[in-house]
Amino acid sequence: ILAPLPIGFAVFLVHLATIPITGTGINPARSLGAAIIYNRDHAWNDHWIFWVGPFIGAALAALYHQIVIRAIPFKSRA
């Protein structure tokens, strides 16, 4: 019931943070397409964040999951 509020705030904050970098392109596929079509040097200046950011976030989430939460591997009953 309360999920739309934090999701909306998260999207709002991401938009505010990325206006100077990408013009608020938070979809990597859409931003890649626009950079290819526009094809100017400054279109690619900050594009690396779309590719590096998710990998860093995934690595941090995996470390958090393994170290902080200490996840137990799933074992089936079969």
Image (cartoon, helix red, strand yellow):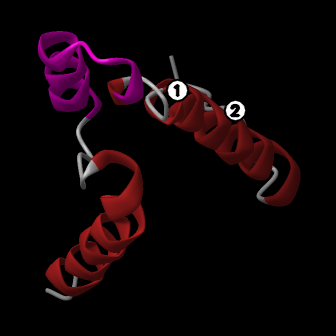
| 21 relative to 31, above or below | below
Considering only order in the chain, which callout, 2 or 1, is on the residue closer to the N terminus?
1
Q: Which element carries disc 2, helix, strand or loop? A: loop
- How far from the left and from the top, in percent, is residue 67? 87, 49
In the rendered structure, the answer to whether residue 45 lies left or right of residue 3 reads right
User: For the residues carrying marks 1 and 2, which lies nearer the camera in this image?
Assistant: 1
User: What residue does disc 1 label?
Assistant: 48
Question: Looking at the image, which residue is at 32% across and 46% down?
Answer: 22
Is residue 23 on the magenta stretch? no
Residue 40 lies in magenta, yes or no? yes
Instruction: From the top left corner, tell me how far across and down residue 56 is, in percent.
Output: 66, 36
Magenta segment's dominant SS is helix
Q: Which residue is drawn at the image coordinates 48% and 29% (left, top)?
A: 45
Residue in the image at 44% along x and 32% along y: 50
Q: Mark 2 points at which residue?
A: 73
Q: How many labels does the image show?
A: 2
Q: Nearer the viewer, residue 16 or 69?
A: 16
Q: In this view, does 37 lie above or below 46?
A: above
Name the residue located 48 percent from the left edge and 35 percent from the top edge.
46
Q: Label 1: state its secondary structure.
A: helix
**Mark 2 residue crowding within 10 angstroms, few (<14) / some (14–19) / many (20+):** few
Q: In this view, does 13 lie above or below 61?
A: below
Residue range (magenta)? 28-42
Q: How far apart are marks 1 and 2 (CA)?
A: 34 Å
Q: Measured from the top left, where is residue 35 in percent x and y?
A: 24, 21
Question: The disc labelled 2 sits on which kind of residue?
Answer: Pro
Screen quadrant of the N terminus: bottom left
Q: Nearer the viewer, residue 55 or 78?
A: 55
Q: Is residue 64 left or right of residue 51?
A: right
